[in-house]
Image (cartoon, rainbow, N blue to C red):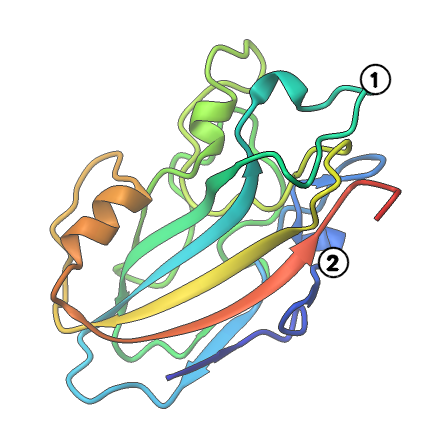
Amino acid sequence: MRLHSESFQNAQPIPADFAMGRVEGFGGNRNPHLAWDEVPAGTRSFVLLCIDPDAPTVPETVGRSDLQIPVEQPRGDFIHWVMVDIPAATRVIEAGSCSDGISARGKQTPPGPDGARQGLNDYTGWFAGDADMGGDYFGYDGPYPPFNDLHMHRYFFRLFALDVERLDVSGKFTAAQVLRAMHAHVLGEAVVHGTYTLNANL
């Protein structure tokens, strides 16, 4: 299975139009174009995840003008998109079709392919307790790495072909629940990734 994007080249910078944050404030927060082919025989649905594996793990260092987050700081995953039950006949997700702009407190019913369901991304936890932004963030919300991070962030769009039409997750499901539920149902995987930074030193 092959996956590509017309919005960015593999391993190259993602335009700010597809990011939640840019140097001067908020970005366009549009989902990027994604298309795929060479689908495995027997595919009944797809799962799409977008994961940044370079998120800092010490919250107290984020967004501070008096220090730079060192590359050596331990990193963790930050989930930007979780979508399941993408119909087997689907071969493309157009740019801006699932997210086009920022919704304070999160998108509650984000658009997507007919029949697909979208779970929570990690802005749900990041903005928890924030009076203006706190809420349940469903669907896609793009890159917004700390401006003081010396690590170039990578964003992996991972597409999985499954042998089931509907995945056994419900409600406010997360990427972790999706990964558990699709165990032993994956027929193939394709990946494309882009990079993004708000640090002027990079």
Residue at 36 percent across and 38 percent down: it is 120
Residue at 44 percent across and 34 percent down: it is 122
Quadrant the N terminus occupies: bottom left
Q: Which mark is residue 66?
A: 1
Whole-percent x and y of residue 16?
A: 74, 51
Residue at 88 percent across and 42 percent down: it is 200
User: Which is closer to the viewer, label 1 or label 2?
Assistant: 1
Say whether marks 1 and 2 touch (CB < 8 Å): no
Label 2 SS: loop
Whole-percent x and y of residue 143?
A: 62, 45
Q: Quadrant of residue 87?
A: bottom left
Which amino acid is tagged 1?
Asp
Location of residue 172 with respect to 152 vertically, above or below: above
Location of residue 101 with respect to 195 vertically, above or below: above
Q: Earlier in the sequence, mark 1 or mark 2?
A: 2
Q: Quadrant of residue 182?
A: bottom left
User: In this orientation, which residue lies closer to the viewer: 24 or 147?
Assistant: 147
Q: Which residue is mark 2?
A: 15
Q: Which mark is residue 38?
A: none
User: In this orientation, which residue lies closer to the viewer: 170 or 62?
Assistant: 62
Which amino acid is tagged 2?
Pro
Report whether residue 94 is seen.
Answer: no
Label 1 SS: loop
